[in-house]
Image: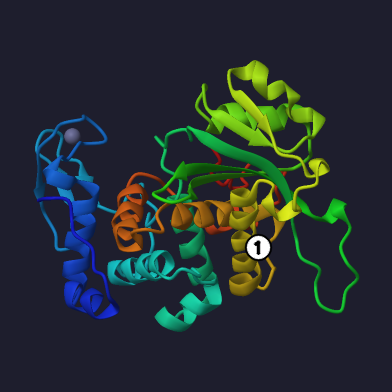
Amino acid sequence: MPRPDFPRTLLEFADRFPTEEAAIDYLVASRWPDGDFKCPTCAHGTAYAISTRGTRECANCKRQVSPTAGTVMHRSRMPARTWLLAAWLLVTDKRGLSAKQLQRQIGGRYETAYQMLQRLRAAMVAPDRSQLFGLVEVDETLIGAPKRGRPERTPADKAIVLGAVEVRTGKKSFYPARIRLRHIKHYRKELLLGFVTDVVRPGSHVVTDAKVDYEGVAELGYEHGCESTSVGDDPADVLKHFHLAISNLKAWLNGTFHGAVSKKHLQAYLNEFMFRYNRRANLHAAFQRLLGLGMQVRGPEYTQLYASPDDNDAWDHPNR
Ligand SMILES: [Zn+2]
């Protein structure tokens, strides 16, 4: 079976997945594209379809493998169609959607919608994603808007987010390409420089503000440029691709989630923002990509989402 195509409109979605069987066929094609089954027990490559739920039986050791076992849909009682609709809505709407909005579309309990979204977010970081390269703006920002009727939060209440934006040259001007964002619990220079070496390919031209902590960047194998307001520039012109992306991020957090994203789960939302931002030119193809990734990773169990961050069982949102 070839890698599946993807619906572009809600009407196409309804035509593409008129039945639960059609949705399961799509999951099977996403999990085992071109029929490349690999048995989790014996690594054998041939299997037979044995049920309408898409389950395959290994031709060698007879192990039965559900297409959703070990994926973001692991042991979910939600129909495959509902999962596909949630993934499609999540990816194709530029504003994404909150658990409340998803619950309205698919029915059921709020907690179920919430867990589905968190599981899908776990599939929004490709394990093999590449480093940014070329011209890259790097800076940090504070996330956490003041709540209405409450005093302005102090910086200590806000979350520190490190960001890097790759800037490419278009026909007439520069434009932002891909973005990487990482939430850190406490600010340390080593974390800042570690972020740069993780997400930016050596040899790139890294542009930062004039903060002294960035002075180490040049020693890490990058060309280092500084943009500073002290020379009389308009602050809006300093690292402007970074600041534009961050203002989009903040508008999204405030608009879709009313600023109610906790620090504990902030990285999941950063991952979602990155996923959509980096694929904004083709959000419908991103649906296919999300399903492909979602068939390779397991998302959080409900209890893992609610465990205290210090608990061993707490879910760590992927952050590579
Ligand atoms: Zn086997």
Where's ligand 1: which quadrant?
top left
Q: Is 49 on the left or on the right of 183, as rendered?
A: left
Check the image and report above or below for 299 versus 92.
above
Q: Which residue is mark 1?
A: 250
Which colour assignment does the render follow? Answer: rainbow
Q: Quadrant of the rendered structure where residue 186 is? A: top right
* Residue visible at 72% across and 49% down in the picture: 141
* Residue visible at 46% across and 68% down in the picture: 94
Q: Residues within 10 Å of mark 1 (few under 14, many from 20)?
A: some
Q: The residue tagged with tag 1: helix, strand or loop? A: helix
Check the image and report above or below for 52 versus 48.
below
Specify whether residue 65 is in view: no
Q: Position of residue 3 (x, y in %)?
A: 17, 51
Specify whether residue 132 is in view: yes
Check the image and report above or below for 285 versus 219.
below
Q: Is 99 on the left or on the right of 2, as rendered?
A: right
Q: Position of residue 232 (x, y in %)?
A: 80, 46
Q: Position of residue 193 (x, y in %)?
A: 68, 28
Three-letter amino acid code at the position of disc 1: Lys
Q: Is 17 on the left or on the right of 82, as rendered?
A: left
Q: Position of residue 265 (x, y in %)?
A: 63, 55
- Give the camera-side residue of 105 and 224: 224
Q: Quadrant of the rendered structure where residue 73 is? A: bottom left
Q: Is 283 on the left or on the right of 108, as rendered?
A: left
- Give the camera-side residue of 48 and 192: 192
